[in-house]
Amino acid sequence: MGAVQGFSAAHGEPASVDGVLEMIRATGGRATTSRRVLLEVLFEDQGHRNAEDLGSEVRARAPEVHISTVYRNLEELERMGVVTHTHLGHGAVTYQLASRSHPHLICAQCGVRIHAPDELFLGLTRAAQRSLGFQIDPSHLAISGLCSDCAPGRTADENS
Ligand SMILES: [Zn+2]
Ligand SMILES: [Zn+2]
Ligand SMILES: [Zn+2]
């Protein structure tokens, strides 16, 4: 992956398929069908999909697009800072538009997935920045633990 400094979202996160294609052209790339269809799929549905899911969706619309092209396009979009990947569990990474990436909590027992507000990580991100100069990205890895159903009424005493 290499040492990427900060987040490449500095490009200004285009808010539409055409906006991203324009950005691709501005950097010398071509607005190919495979790129357009992949972007349409990403913009239309906010669900968490891995590369294989996205490949099937692109090919359902444009069967002539080879699956390896979809994977390569995903890598390109990620390098450009348009797309990010997230590790939600033990399976394959999922991809989403960088502007829609968000933190998750996952229950280790029942597997329930909770969308966590960014504010939850404010104290942590500030402390890491201040004391270590480290910029935490809370959206990259889901945080594991026990949900309120799986850890009912558990107190600090019972845990020890
Ligand atoms: Zn990763
Ligand atoms: Zn649970
Ligand atoms: Zn989510």
Image (tube, helix red, strand yellow):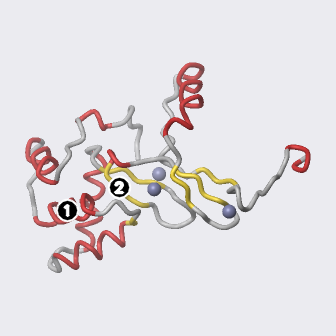
Number of numbered tags placed on the structure image: 2
Q: Say whether marks 2 and 1 touch (CB < 8 Å).
A: no
Residue matched to label 1: 40
Is 2 left or right of 63, judged from the image as shown? right
Instruction: Name above or below for residue 94 compared with residue 117.
Output: below
Instruction: Report if the beta carbon of the residue with label 2 is closer than 8 angstroms to ligand 3.
Output: yes
- Residue 98 percent across, percent down from the top left: 33, 47
Residue 111 placed where, x, y %? 62, 65
As shown in the figure, which amino acid type bears the numbered disc 1? Glu
Label 1 SS: helix
**Which one is nearer the viewer's eye here, 29 or 95?**
95
- Find disc 2 in the rendering and name its residue: 96
Secondary element at tag 2: strand
Give the percent coordinates (x, y) of residue 66.
21, 74
Instruction: Mark 2: give few (<14), some (14-19) or many (20+) Cα within 10 Å.
Output: many
Is residue 31 or residue 127 the one in the foreground? 127
Looking at the image, residue 110 lies above or below residue 18: below
The residue shown at (31%, 37%) is 8
Residue 13 tag number: none
In whole angstroms, how far apart are the C-alphas of marks 2 and 1? 12 Å
Identify which residue is drawn at 65% across, 59% down.
107
Q: Residue at x 60, y 63 (%)?
A: 112
